[in-house]
Amino acid sequence: MQSSIIELVNALSQFATPSNLLMIFVAGLIGTIVGALPGLGPSAGIALMMPLTFGMDPISGLSLLTGVYMGTMYGGRLTAILINTPGDAPAIVTALDGYPMMQQGKGGLALGISAVASFIGGMFGLVMLIFFAPVIAEYAIYLGPPEYFMLMLLGLSMIIVLAGADPLKATITTLFGVLLSTIGSDYVSGNTRFVVVPELIEGVDFVAVIIGLFGIGEVLSNVEKRVLLNMGKPRFRISEFIPGVENLRKISMPTLRGSLIGTMIGVLPGAGATIATFVSYITERKLSKTPERFGHGAEEGLASPEAANNAAVPGSLIPLLTLGIPGSGGTAIMLGALIMFGLNPGPMLMIQSADIVWGAIAGLVIANLFLLGSNVLLIPLFVNALRLIQRHLSSIVVAFCLVGAFAINYGTFDIWIAAIFGLVGYLMKKADYPAGPFILALVLTPLAENYLRQSIMIGQGSWAIFFSRPLTGLFTSLVLLVIAIGLLKTPMMKFFRARRSA
């Protein structure tokens, strides 16, 4: 550990030149803007900035890309909180409690809590990256398809927790998500399923679905109700947007738990920040003494996923740098950048190119510090800009959504998908069907199916592979435990409510 600190200090001293610091600051701001735009996430942000790194030295180029990567994770929360339009998939969970806080006139406070939680999550993940990268990667490599399948199944079983007061409606939306995720070509055989037009060969694009479900669906609902947000008077005092002592006390433990969950899930290849935010949110709701507050502006429900979101960034870099395995879409592009700079990602990278690796990590630390400051200082600007345009907000949000949907594949098909799911989102909101189970099923089902097929092939057709390995047995027990608690919880809650009313 002492050697890691020495390496980091040396990298910081060598890297902290005025030009590099300015580059990191600008990269973070660009990443924030890209992350806020619906349909453009970390992958798009890194891909857009990669041509600028041609001709740069590896440390500066990687620092530019990692600064953009971290910035997009901050930026996704802006539109999620202010207009209920997540910039990327992980920001979906941010919108669940962030937007209700905005509706209550606490939009500035929500952005402040989000910035603080994101900073703590990012720093926590960086500490894990600095000190425990080789150790964590060593254990992560032992997880195979059977373990990943049981992890996905554990995530799907958590839908019971998101069911709320009506498990039947949650089950219906879950099955709808599962059905939708089966559209496209089969992972193993290549056979197509429910492909009525060529554009569906790769399935329904997840980003287009969330743009329609949350963005356009919310606009339709607000237009019907003629909703105007409680924005109050214009204020530019930073102190009003920074969380107070009581707010910090309330979010301290959820932020730490979210940071731990985000780092651990970020290490798992293919899991990424989206699953980390869902798991952290579900965990906080399960641990809360007042779970009914979640979805209506609970500060804990905002802080924990935001910490998990940013902690997953350094977490996903651990398998990339130590094993050469990308942990998310963004790190997959980073893998290409490493190869482009002539590096060889894998166990020998931190030995053969230690100066470059530690320089990139130093850039991440600096970017996280800059992003906290810039995001807090810009909160009044975001909130008051929204106050000025809120009478035209519906048309602006729809325009953003349509442009974001077009930017996914530069075609009109995704625009139609977003429009259709905008109507679906409106009808779900009107009939009080929860969107959480639907989104969770849509995210996890393709992963679960892929890992299931791989596991059966490894076991040569035998299902015993899910019980004969120690970790799969543990995960199976956790799945059964979660289902049992969920089934017992509903009748118990009805019993206690009846006793209370009596």
Image (spheres, rainbow, N blue to C red):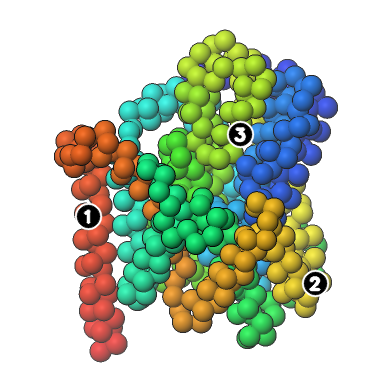
Q: Distance between the residues labelled 3 and 2?
A: 36 Å
Q: Residues within 10 Å of mark 2 (few under 14, many from 20)?
A: few
Q: Find residue 430 and report its horizontal and vertical position in percent.
A: 51, 82
Label pair 3/1, CB-CB below 8 angstroms: no
Secondary structure at numbered mark 3: helix
Give the residue type that dot 1 points to.
Answer: Leu
Left or right of residue 169, residue 408 in this image = right
Identify the residue at horizontal 24%, vertical 83% (top origin): 499
Secondary structure at numbered mark 1: helix
Quarter holding residue 223: bottom right
Per the image, the residue denoted by label 3 is 333
Q: Nearer the viewer, residue 95 or 42?
A: 42
Q: How far apart are marks 3 and 1 (CA)?
A: 38 Å
Identify the residue at horizontal 72%, vertical 74% (top origin): 394
Which residue extends farthest top? 352
Please give the label number shown on residue 421: none
For the C terminus, the image quarter is bottom left
Q: Which of 79 and 54 is in front in this view?
A: 54
Secondary structure at numbered mark 2: helix
Give the residue type that dot 2 points to.
Answer: Ile
Q: Distance between the residues labelled 2 and 1?
A: 49 Å
Left or right of residue 447, residue 200 in this image = right
Per the image, the residue denoted by label 1 is 481
Q: Find residue 94 and report its horizontal and vertical position in percent.
A: 56, 59
Per the image, the residue denoted by label 2 is 389
Left or right of residue 276, residue 413 in this image = right
Label pair 2/1, CB-CB below 8 angstroms: no
